Amino acid sequence: MAVNAAEQRTFRHLPGYFNARQQAELLLHIKDILEIAPLFQPVMPRTGKAFSVRMSNCGPLGWVSDKERGYRYQPTHPVTEEAWPAMPKLLLDLWLREARYPAPPEACLINLYQEGAKMGAHQDRDEADFSAPVVSVSLGDAAVFHVGGRKRTDPKVRVTLKSGDVLLLEGESRLAYHGIDRVIAGSSELLARCGFAEGGRMNLTLRRVTGVG
Ligand code: SIN
Ligand code: FE2
């Protein structure tokens, strides 16, 4: 219990990190990225059950999941087999300022939440060096995010993530179970205004995959 409380305290929530203009700029960059690296539907290893989010990536590596080969990072899109597009500078700058890690991020996952999509409790543990944080950016509709401890059964705290918020899982919280309980549909117009007709929520997570040296 004491350990769990410490794990939870080490996540860092930076509300309103990006202003409205920066949020729109970021989303327009993501739109361009999705023209080159279209959204795809990841499925769970073994069961083949589809995630409720659709996703893509930018940066040198991207996270993918399929029934046969499971969770992994790879340098190419699973459908087009092309290299992932580069990460927008706004995201590289965010990492430089906030990650407290001596090397740049290698992957940025792009998750699109529409039509009741959510994300079950999981740990981010497909990376080599857990001293690098996972840095997340929320755009569009607000969402209820939960963070627990390193055991699935540890108690959770809940945080509402709004458009422009940044959240870092770092230190003791790096391996904490976390997920999205629900998205508050219609709480932001950002996605609809930027060309995602159905609206929804976009989450970007920056990760260092290979460690340093
Ligand atoms: C994730 O943990 O993969 C996504 C978190 C979020 O959507 O805020
Ligand atoms: Fe995650």
Image (cartoon, helix red, strand yellow):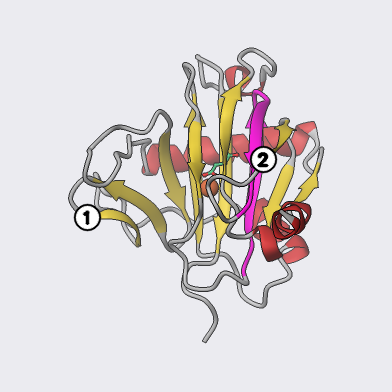
Q: Is residue 95 visible?
A: no
Q: Residues within 10 Å of mark 1 (few under 14, many from 20)?
A: few
Q: Which mark is residue 156?
A: 2
In this picture, is 68 found above or below 139? below
Q: Nearer the viewer, mark 2 or mark 1?
A: 2
Left or right: residue 30 compared with residue 155: left
The location of residue 47, given as percent across then percent down, is 22, 39
The location of residue 180, given as percent across then percent down, is 57, 33
User: For the residue marked with disc 1, what is the amino acid?
Assistant: Arg
**Discs 2, 1 touching: Cβ within 8 Å:** no
The secondary structure that most of the magenta stretch takes on is: strand
Q: Which residues are magenta?
A: 132-149
Left or right: residue 61 compared with residue 211: left
Secondary structure, mark 1, is loop
Choose between 82 and 166: the one closer to the eye: 166
Residue topped by disc 1: 69
Left or right: residue 81 compared with residue 184: left
> Which residue sits at x=27%, y=33%?
49
**Quadrant of residue 174 within the rendered picture:** bottom right
User: For the residue marked with disc 2, what is the amino acid?
Assistant: Lys
Q: Is mark 2 within 8 Å of ligand 1?
A: no
Left or right: residue 5 compared with residue 47: right
Looking at the image, is mark 2 or mark 1 earlier in the sequence? 1
Choose between 10 and 184: the one closer to the eye: 10
The location of residue 213, given as percent across then percent down, is 52, 87
